[in-house]
Structures are given as structure tokens and as C-alpha cells.
Amino acid sequence: MDPLTHALASYAIYRAVAPRQSPLAAPLLITAGVLPDLDLLSFLAGPRAFVIYDGALTHSLLGAALLAAAVGIAFFLIGRKSKEAPLSLPLALGLSVLGVAAHLLLDLCGTPAVRLLWPFSQRQFAW
């Protein structure tokens, strides 16, 4: 899926789940929903790296969990510095996991398969 679809889906989730939370909730969900596509940058390392890491590095369950934790903690720390936009750690992590999970679910419905079990398995999943 394209990044715009992921961003709009993440914003829709924000509107459904956390519209009255911190003002940082929408940017957090949108960032978490779009960020797994960072593995597309593996093309910078060459065609071999692109084939190995695209749809695997941040689209695997392990990579997605690490990415969600990093985004959640980053937004929690940003929210701590802002007096008018506090964001609790459980809320930040929960919204981040929700955004990344929505990204993976949307990509499972798309044409290119994702390797959810990478690096433990190269099996590709697609609906």
C-alpha cells in the first residue's frame, strides 16, 4: 500500500479510538502507521539488500514490535517536555502498536507479500 493510504487509515483509527486524548496522539498514530515502510530505503544499499530487507525488516513481527516501542517511547518523551500535551507511556505504546499493526494488516491485503516471521523464516504472507 502507498504511504497516503497508511496515513489516512491511521488518522481514521485516531478519530475512532483517541480523539480526546493528547494532541500528540494523531501524529503518533500517523507516524507509527507510515514508518514501517522505512525498509524501502534498503534500495540505497543495492539490489541485493533491497530483495533481502524489503517487506521484511520493519514488516516482520519482531521488527514491527521494536519499531512500535521506539515510536511510542519517543512520543512519550516528547510529550513529557510539553506541558499542554502530556502522553502517558502506556497510551503512547498502545497507540504506537495500534498504528504499526494497522500497517501490517493493510500490507497483508496488498499485492506484495510480507515476511512476518523474518529473520526466523523467509515465508511470505499475503491475503
Image (tube, rainbow, N blue to C red):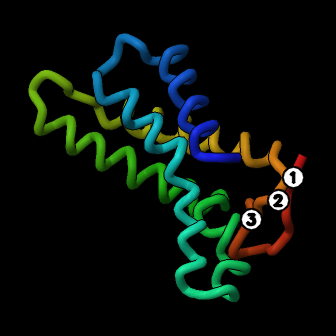
Judged left or right of residue 109, residue 75 is left
Q: Are marks 2 and 1 in contact (CB under 8 Å)?
A: yes
Give the spatial CA distance, label 2 vs label 3. 12 Å
Name the amino acid type tagged 2.
Ala
Q: Which residue corresponds to the image point at 65% horizontal and 75% vertical from the top-left?
A: 53
Judged left or right of residue 18, residue 48 is right
Q: Position of residue 6 (x, y in %)?
A: 60, 39
SS of the residue under disc 3: loop
Q: Position of residue 49 (x, y in %)?
A: 64, 84
Q: Which residue corresponds to the image point at 42% horizontal and 40% vertical from the top-left?
A: 93
Rendered view: 42 above or below 56: below
Q: What is the number of the mark on residue 126? A: 1
| Circle count | 3
Name the amino acid type tagged 3.
Leu
Q: Are marks 3 and 1 in contact (CB under 8 Å)?
A: no
Q: Residues within 10 Å of mark 3 (few under 14, many from 20)?
A: some
Name the amino acid type tagged 1.
Ala
Q: What is the number of the mark on residue 117? A: 3
Question: Nearer the N terminus, badge 2 or badge 1?
Answer: 2
Q: Position of residue 92 (x, y in %)?
A: 37, 35
Q: Position of residue 29 (x, y in %)?
A: 46, 34
SS of the residue under disc 2: loop
Judged left or right of residue 88, residue 127 is right
SS of the residue under disc 1: loop
Residue most extreme to the top: 20
Residue most extreme to the right: 127
Question: Nearer the N terminus, badge 3 or badge 1?
Answer: 3
Q: Which residue corresponds to the image point at 61% horizontal and 87% vertical from the top-left?
A: 46
Q: Residues within 10 Å of mark 2 (few under 14, many from 20)?
A: some
List the residue tagged with mark 2: 113
Q: Which residue corresponds to the image point at 27% horizontal and 40% vertical from the top-left?
A: 76
